[in-house]
């Protein structure tokens, strides 16, 4: 693993997955690569964290899943956002903004 | 909604869910490989790199499964299935564990239900935590303590810190003829508010009124439930009727509920009648009765505050006190005791000691099982390594182990609950009969919760032992390791040995404790009671005050009774006595000595005194030491004589000849000549030291109650029927009661000590057995794992004797270390048993040494069996094995 990759902060994996899927349905490897891409390689999601999170969020009704053909003609499970998932994304974003703001002002205060 | 649907899907369409999951992860791996192949790797390299990045398909699948709804349920079911399979495959381990836990948990459940009933659960009275038992006593006089009526009425009238203060006591046995054959029944005098302070409502009719509880009020009575059932056919119309008791006509005001019992069971409640104390403090001689007094504190008031108030009230009225009381007041102390402490004070110590003992038994059992678990965990390392390789995390494996041990402990707990329930009656029979709280001992929700809790704790502790012992599952090492018999690294061994030493030490403490109780019992049982209990039957009679109003009528009744009883064929001798060894004497008389300076007022010692017939000493075989016993010539009209016991002579005539001296008694100081000295008998139970006692001819000291004492070789039932017949032939209204042989009474006096010894002995034996199993297990395990080493040693020329010595030595070092620690522990904790012991010091060296030697012997036997197996090792077989 590259030395500049960082472990995910707790709670941020859900946010990143939801954000990724807001652009359109995607399969597991796609989600993983997209997160790597949009965070500039800072975060790398291992399958052992990704799949449990996907299944959990599907059970919570934020994601739905269906089988489809991948670009390499493989039968893959595609995840997409549900209505509840979109609402959730809003909530998670708001929460993240609050945390980020709080931490930033804490760092600047010192 | 989603969750529920998922749960249902996960549960009922498991195979589809599994198929989908497998497909999903495999696709992921394939796509990963595609990606790598595109970047220039060969297909084979790409697939390998993908596998590495993925970290194992099965592991990922397991992680996903753990995130599914209801995963814990799934895993639990799988764990349970697996645990059951493991136990079926290993029935020896399973049954040893379940039996050990069942015994430990059963004993704890039974004892805890006693602790719960006596010390934890609220007493069956209203606001029982605010009830106090109040008494006055003289520290130097061990006579039954009781407040004077004068003080009682004083407090009742003037105390501001207690809500109410009520009394009962003054037992009275009366002859009841109504509703059947004449019968002696015991009743109790109560103040009108007693039922209220206890929160008891009559089952029928009403409580006494204050008017009925005044001196000179028309006599009334409340019937006990049993009496009402037995003699009055449970008819409700009985209320308001009148019955005659001992010649007094009483109006029945009500019937007590069946559940009613006085806090102390010594007082029987066939009926209650009002005490009739004056409402204002004042004292006539007839008012001086013994009462038990209960007070209810006002909320928020402390016991100390009430004590101060009561002392102050007594001080304030000192000038109005009648002269009899002034002389008694010297040194009198007031004591207030919370009700529970008063009721259970006698047994709470033994119950707690026994509870501690069974807790230790369970602890030893758990240590044993923990040792077995560690040994199993080591044997199962390969299995665990395989499970790790197949995707199980450390936490998952720990949970599997825990499920196994919890399953065992739950089985043990359930069996233990059944055992404990079965043991309740046994335990109840060991408690003193006077403790009526013993009737409330049962398995209630609190006890159930306790049992469940100790079962869970036992399961967790024993199940976690291998985890705590650090039997880490390092994957490749364990998979590669071929043999389970290599010379093990030291750490498990150290832990094994530590656990065995601990359990030996704990068992040693128990063994020492039970040894002390056994010795106490032997001391007590071998006491010379001072009389010969064999072949003596005793019956109690009480003459009615109306029919036998004068001393003369009583004396002549006793004389006729003696004559007819002695004539029963087969009776060797017959006697009458107002007192009986072990039971004591009803009367105590202030006594002084002719020719000695008069003592200060109230300074004459009160000596127990009993009127007896001339054959009393011979019938009980109390030895006459000096002078003479009574004869038929010592009558009412002849000169006054007494016989004293040895203790009297030692205390009041040290170094002098008492025979021929005079004692003086009563207000007129009549002189009475000491004509003889007899041996001491244990007067009031076995525990109390022998005190001075005086005997007088019954014609000169006539009491309305007496024992008829018969020495005979006739069978008990025949003798007691014949004696009752004799009594009835003289007075058909006079029943004989409290019929018992002196052997019965001796056994009764020993019963508490016997009970403590028996229970503690059972628990100590259990502890010893478990500790022996523990030693055996560890040595057997050692022989097993070191058979290779032993084989090599023997191949190199070691003799069987050397191997035997080595193995025995290993075991005995553990046992002796445990015994030494246990002895030190015993010295520290047996002090808490002091009140349970009898004439044995808590650190009695002989008892401790004997227990230690016994333990060492058992330990040697436990080591010998595996040691013998070790020397049978054939070096060739062992060496060829691998």
Image (tube, coloured by chain):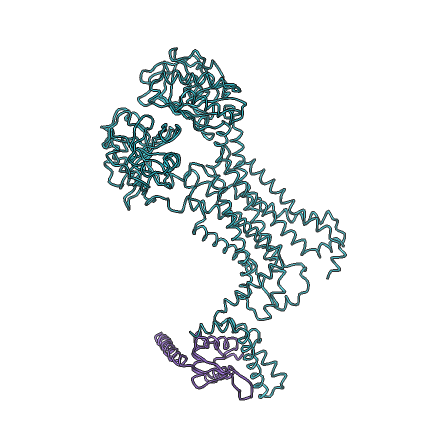
Chain colours: A purple, B cyan
Q: On the rendered image, what quadrant is the N terminus of chain B found in?
A: bottom left
Q: Nearer the viewer, residue B789 or B365?
A: B365
Against B831, residue B686 (above or below) is above
Q: Nearer the viewer, residue B143 or B472?
A: B143
Q: Position of residue B615 (x, y in %)?
A: 47, 17
Q: Is residue B64 left or right of residue B812?
A: left
Q: On the rendered image, what quadrant is the C terminus of chain B found in?
A: bottom right
Q: Position of residue B325 (x, y in %)?
A: 28, 26
Q: Quadrant of residue B690?
A: top left
Against B346, residue B5 (above or below) is below
Q: Position of residue B152 (x, y in %)?
A: 28, 33
Q: Quadrant of residue B599?
A: top left
Q: Nearer the viewer, residue B90 or B206?
A: B206
Residue positioned 57% across, 55% down in the render: B370
Against B299, residue B457 (above or below) is below
Q: How many marks?
A: 0
């Amino acid at each position: 693993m590259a030395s500049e990759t960082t472990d995910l902060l707790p709670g941020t994996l859900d946010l990143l997955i939801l954000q990724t899927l807001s652009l359109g349905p995607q399969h597991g490897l796609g989600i993983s690569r997209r997160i790597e891409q949009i965070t500039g390689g800072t975060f790398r999601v291992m399958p052992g964290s990704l799949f449990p999170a996907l299944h959990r969020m599907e059970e919570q009704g934020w994601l739905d899943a269906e089988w489809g053909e991948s670009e390499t003609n493989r039968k893959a499970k595609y995840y997409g956002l549900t209505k509840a998932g979109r609402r959730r994304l809003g909530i998670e974003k708001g929460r993240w903004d609050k945390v980020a703001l709080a931490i930033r002002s804490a760092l600047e205060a010192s | 909604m989603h969750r529920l649907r998922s749960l249902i899907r996960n549960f009922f369409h498991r195979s589809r869910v599994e198929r989908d999951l497998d497909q999903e992860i495999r696709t992921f791996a394939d796509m990963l490989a595609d990606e790598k192949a595109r970047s220039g790797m060969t297909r084979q390299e790409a697939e390998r790199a993908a596998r590495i990045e993925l970290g194992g398909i099965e592991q990922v699948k397991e992680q996903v499964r753990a995130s599914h709804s209801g995963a814990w349920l799934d895993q639990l079911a799988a764990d349970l299935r697996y645990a059951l399979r493991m136990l079926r495959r290993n029935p020896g381990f399973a049954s040893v564990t379940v039996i050990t836990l069942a015994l430990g948990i059963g004993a704890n459940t039974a004892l805890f239900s006693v602790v719960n009933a006596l010390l934890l659960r609220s007493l069956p009275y209203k606001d029982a935590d605010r009830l106090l038992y109040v008494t006055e006593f003289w520290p130097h006089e061990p006579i039954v303590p009781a407040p004077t009526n004068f003080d009682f009425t004083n407090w009742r009238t003037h105390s501001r810190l207690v809500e109410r203060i009520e009394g009962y006591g003054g037992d009275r046995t009366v002859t009841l003829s109504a509703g059947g054959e004449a019968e002696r029944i015991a009743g109790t005098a109560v103040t009108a508010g007693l039922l209220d302070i206890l929160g008891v409502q009559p089952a029928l009719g009403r409580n006494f009124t204050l008017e009925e509880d005044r001196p000179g009020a028309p006599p009334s009575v409340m019937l006990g439930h049993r009496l009402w059932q037995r003699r009055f056919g449970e008819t409700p119309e009985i209320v308001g009727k009148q019955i005659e008791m001992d010649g007094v006509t009483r109006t029945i005001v009500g019937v007590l509920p069946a559940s009613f019992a006085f806090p102390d069971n010594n007082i029987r409640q066939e009926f209650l009648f009002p005490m009739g104390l004056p409402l204002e403090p004042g004292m006539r001689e007839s008012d001086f009765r013994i009462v038990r007094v209960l007070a209810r504190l006002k909320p928020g008031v402390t016991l100390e505050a009430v004590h101060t108030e009561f002392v102050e009230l007594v001080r304030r009225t000192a000038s109005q006190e009648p002269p009899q009381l002034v002389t008694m007041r010297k040194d009198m102390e007031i004591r207030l005791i919370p009700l529970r402490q008063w009721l259970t004070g006698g047994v709470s110590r033994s119950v707690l000691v026994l509870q501690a003992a069974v807790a230790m038994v369970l602890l030893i059992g758990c240590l044993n099982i923990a040792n077995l678990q560690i040994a199993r965990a080591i044997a199962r390392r390969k299995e665990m390594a395989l499970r790790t390789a197949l995707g199980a995390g450390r936490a998952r494996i720990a949970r599997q182990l825990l499920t196994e041990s919890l399953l065992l402990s739950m089985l043990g707990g359930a069996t233990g609950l059944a055992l404990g329930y079965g043991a309740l009656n046994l335990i109840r029979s060991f408690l003193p009969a006077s403790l009526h709280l013993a009737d409330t001992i049962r398995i209630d929700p609190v006890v159930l919760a306790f049992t469940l809790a100790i079962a869970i704790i036992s399961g967790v502790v024993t199940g976690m032992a291998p985890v705590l012992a650090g039997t880490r599952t390092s994957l490749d090492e364990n998979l590669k390791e071929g043999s389970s018999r290599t010379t093990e690294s030291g750490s498990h061994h150290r832990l094994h040995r530590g656990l065995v030493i601990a359990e030996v030490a704990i068992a040693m403490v128990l063994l020492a404790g039970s040894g002390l109780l056994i010795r106490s019992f032997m001391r007590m049982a071998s006491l010379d009671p001072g009389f010969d209990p064999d072949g003596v039957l005793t019956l109690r009679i009480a003459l009615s005050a109306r029919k036998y109003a004068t001393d003369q009528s009583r004396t002549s009744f006793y004389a006729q009774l003696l004559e007819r009883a002695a004539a029963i064929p087969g009776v060797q001798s017959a006697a009458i006595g107002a007192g009986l060894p072990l039971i004591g004497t009803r009367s105590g008389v202030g006594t002084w000595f002719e020719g000695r300076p008069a003592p200060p007022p109230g300074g004459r010692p009160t000596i127990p005194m009993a009127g007896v017939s001339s054959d009393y000493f011979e019938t009980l075989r109390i030895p006459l030491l000096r002078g003479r016993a009574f004869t038929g010539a010592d009558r009412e009209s002849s000169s006054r004589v007494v016989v004293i016991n040895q203790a009297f002579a030692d205390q009041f005539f040290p170094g002098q000849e008492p025979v021929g001296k005079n004692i003086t008694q009563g207000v007129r100081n009549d002189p009475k000549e000491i004509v003889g000295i007899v041996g001491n008998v244990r007067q009031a139970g076995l525990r109390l030291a022998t005190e001075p006692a005086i005997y007088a001819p019954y014609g000169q000291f006539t009491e309305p109650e007496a024992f008829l004492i018969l020495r005979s070789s006739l069978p008990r039932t025949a003798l007691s029927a014949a004696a009752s017949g004799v009594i009835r032939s003289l007075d058909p209204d006079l029943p004989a009661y409290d019929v018992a042989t002196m052997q019965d009474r001796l056994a009764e006096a020993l019963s508490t000590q016997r009970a403590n010894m028996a229970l503690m002995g059972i628990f100590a034996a259990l502890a010893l057995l478990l500790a022996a199993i523990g030693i055996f297990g560890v040595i057997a395990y050692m022989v097993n794992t070191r058979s290779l080493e032993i084989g090599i040693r023997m191949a190199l020329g070691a003799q069987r004797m050397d191997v035997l010595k080595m193995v025995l030595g290993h075991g005995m070092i553990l046992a002796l270390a445990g015994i030494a620690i246990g002895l030190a522990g015993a010295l520290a904790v047996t002090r808490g048993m002091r009140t349970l012991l009898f004439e044995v010091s808590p650190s009695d060296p002989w008892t401790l040494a004997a227990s230690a030697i016994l333990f060492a012997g058992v330990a040697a036997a436990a080591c010998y069996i595996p040691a013998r197996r070790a020397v049978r090792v054939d070096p060739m077989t062992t060496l060829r094995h691998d």
